Image (tube, rainbow, N blue to C red):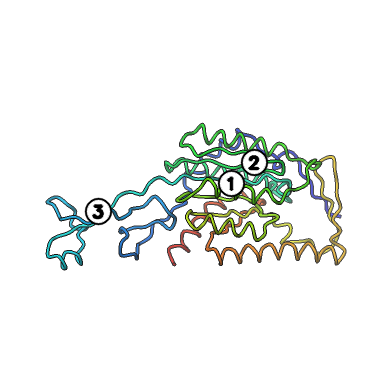
Amino acid sequence: MIPISTGREGAYVTTEQLVALEANARDLRFVQKAKSHQQLAGRLQSSLRGRGLIFEELRDYLPGDDVRSIDWRVTARTTKPTIRVYGEEKERPAILLVDQRINMFFGSRRSLKSVTAAEAAMLCAWRILGSGDKVGGLVFNDAGTSELRPHRSRNAVIALADRIAEKNAALSADYAIASAHQALDDALQLTANRARHDYLIVVISDFDGHGSTTRDLLLRLSASNDVICLLIYDPFLLELPKAGDIVVSGGGLQAELALGRGAVRKAVDKFARDRGNDLRAWQRELGLPMLPVSAAEETAPQLRRLLEQSAFRQRRR
């Protein structure tokens, strides 16, 4: 039998550790500028809403105006030099949904999924604040949700770190409350009530318990906001040992997973495969970035690479 244990390191994260991630977040990029193909857009547009230029009006050319702003079609039609005036888009507040349910309290290598989710959330929060936008969050577990409205301040991000660390510390192998699949949909519903339009929504979860309601809520959110899903996973389910049983330990409790039995192994493999297929289908159908973040690797380098790849795909569209 192969033991998998979860010691203190990698199983929990503190507010201080989350706050210290600020330095690792400085080169993350949520917005990639791309050439615009829209007639009424500026010379550059964002692959995500916000942080770009929006068309405001046409007016007569005045001495000193940039000649590159002249609209030559309108000028030819009216016989008067006419320029396009652009304004900078308004700020884009962000809401981070951070999953700290008992299903996240699992990991086979570097850290538990709950820790990786916490790290990913704080890297996003620090980068969003560094971009000058407001950031808030919904940190949810099986018992309930802690909400922080978006603010533009270091204190707001530190408060978010406190809430995440608090929910994270409550997790244990003998957790008294059964996993609440409804908690993910409840957090998405609350976000939909708050984020009417032009928000950046980052969902950080393993999407355990997802269903048609989850899909519909993501569709509703993405209709008028930018939504990024960070799919936190552990490679254990993708790389099952070829033989033998597994003993999973959370300290005082142990459980045996009989992977040597064909039926058990087949069920675990099917579970992982079906979830992956569902989420990939959502990505294609809803057009949402569904970025896989492994709990077995350092979080910051993964997030940096995934966001760059996502921006590249947006540019190619």
Residue 172: image quadrant is top right
Tag in front: 1 or 3: 1
Mark seen at residue 242: none
- Residue with the mark numbered 2: 145
- How far from the left and from the top, in percent, is residue 212? 65, 61
Dot 2 falls on a residue whose secondary structure is strand
Looking at the picture, which amino acid does disc 3 mark?
Answer: Val
State which tag comes first along the sequence, 2 or 3: 3
Relative side of 56 to 114, left or right: left
- How far from the left and from the top, in percent, is residue 201? 52, 50
Relative side of 222 to 61, left or right: right
Relative side of 207 to 301, left or right: right
User: Which quadrant does the N terminus fall into?
Assistant: bottom right
Looking at the picture, which amino acid does disc 2 mark?
Answer: Thr
Label 2, label 3: how many angstroms apart (C-alpha)? 44 Å
Please tell me which residue lies in front, 276 or 72: 72
Looking at the picture, which amino acid does disc 1 mark?
Answer: Leu
Dot 1 falls on a residue whose secondary structure is helix
- Residue with the mark numbered 3: 85
Q: Within 10 angstroms of label 3, few (less than 14), some, or many (20 or more) residues?
A: some
Mark seen at residue 190: 1
* Residue at image point 43% right, 43% down: 131
User: Which quadrant does the C terminus fall into?
Assistant: bottom left
Q: Is residue 169 above or below residue 35?
A: above
State which tag comes first along the sequence, 1 or 3: 3
- How far from the left and from the top, in percent, is residue 79? 12, 65
Q: Within 10 angstroms of label 2, few (less than 14), some, or many (20 or more) residues?
A: many
Label 1, label 3: how many angstroms apart (C-alpha)? 37 Å
* Residue at image point 56% right, 33% down: 159
Q: Are marks 1 and 3 in contact (CB under 8 Å)?
A: no
